[in-house]
Amino acid sequence: MEFKHKSVLLDETIEGLSIRPDGIYVDGTLGGAGHASEVCQRLSAKGRFIGIDQDQDAIIAASERLAAYEDRVTIIRSNYCYMVNELKNLGIQKVDGIVLDLGVSSYQLDNEERGFTYRVDAPLDMRMDQRQSRTAADIVNGYDEKELYRIIRDYGEDKFAKNIAKHIVAARAKAPIQTTGELTEIIRQSIPMKIQATGGHPAKRTFQAIRIELNRELDVLRESLDGMIDLLDDGGRICIITFHSLEDRIVKTIFRKNENPCTCPPDFPVCVCGKESKGKVITRKPILPSKVEMEENPRSKSAKLRIFERRYKK
Ligand SMILES: C[S@@+](CC[C@H](N)C(=O)[O-])C[C@H]1O[C@@H](n2cnc3c(N)ncnc32)[C@H](O)[C@@H]1O
């Protein structure tokens, strides 16, 4: 299947990076290299680009797309949570810019074999990294009712989480749930018809929840962000595109904490905690896609771009 993905907030991200032609740039979510190829185009022969993705299909597609820049490009199959170490292995201590375009690509969603979507019947897989042994089926058939409820409530923000978890457990007591179609049908039976007629697809939130849990999407983001900010050289920027409020909240909070890490009580006349700012939040409010982009690419509708700039104390 051809790797098709329309990059979201492309111009805004490239502008936000403020690219220096001889700088070092990293994309931790390389995908089809849409953002990456725009970065590479702006680099001189002295510049360097490192692209990371955990998905083998993305690595193959991106390698082909970036072949023309091979003198300045390194592509690594890894999780971006290992970015600091992967760069250290290349002898790189500091970089001038980082891009994260979170979540799944359209290719992953549309590829029927990958089991990310409720739109087609496929094995319950949802792994971004195909080397991982655990799949969505292990979560659906292995988690107890309380754990299923927790993830559907917290990561899917679904009002019917309790009922969905109950129906999953009842259904799998008869036979293991093996396909996206079976799971979708169980979710349909857990949500009142009246709600199904008005809201989006009834399975959307539960599928999102299972995907986030399986790929540890929020934990990885939360655990990696400080390290990435520390990787930035003076004036270097990190641009992050999120697709739902859970991710966006993590980015917003960690950016703010890095801008103002002081933990002194507000009534203290001077700071005594000694924690110093690491830079500036460039986007007080997130940058959103234009109306035109949302019309041309409906998947961009929920996207938000936030940018942080590293500033060293002079
Ligand atoms: C939205 S797509 C990126 C698309 C890309 N910016 C483009 O324009 O073609 C997200 C990609 O990030 C990858 N990804 C998500 N989380 C990751 C992680 N923690 N580590 C490495 N890759 C990850 C996914 O496999 C997917 O290929």
Image (tube, rainbow, N blue to C red):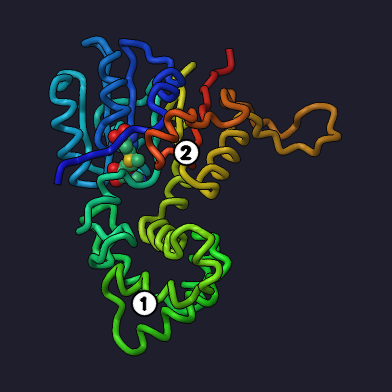
- Quadrant in which ligand 1 is drawn: top left
Tag 2: amino acid: Ala
**Residue at 37% in and 70% down:** 184
**Residue at 34% in and 62% down:** 118
Quadrant of the image for the C terminus? Answer: top right
Q: Which residue is mark 2?
A: 303
Q: Residues within 10 Å of mark 1 (few under 14, many from 20)?
A: some
Q: Which residue is mark 1?
A: 142
Tally of numbered tags: 2
**Residue at 25% in and 66% down:** 121
Residue 151 coordinates in the image, percent (x, y): 49, 65
Ligand 1 within 8 Å of disc 1? The answer is no
Pick the front one: 180 or 282:
180
**Residue at 43% in and 72% down:** 187
Dot in front, 2 or 1: 2
Q: Which one is earlier in the sequence, the residue at label 2 or at label 1?
A: 1
CB atoms of marks 2 and 1 within 8 Å: no
Residue 131 coordinates in the image, percent (x, y): 21, 56
Residue 141 coordinates in the image, percent (x, y): 35, 77
Above/below status of 222 relative to 278: below
Pick the front one: 143 or 201:
201
Provide the secondary structure element on which disc 1 rests. Answer: helix
Q: Quadrant of residue 114?
A: bottom left
* Residue 255 - label: none
Q: Residues within 10 Å of mark 2 (few under 14, many from 20)?
A: many
Provide the secondary structure element on which disc 2 rests. Answer: loop
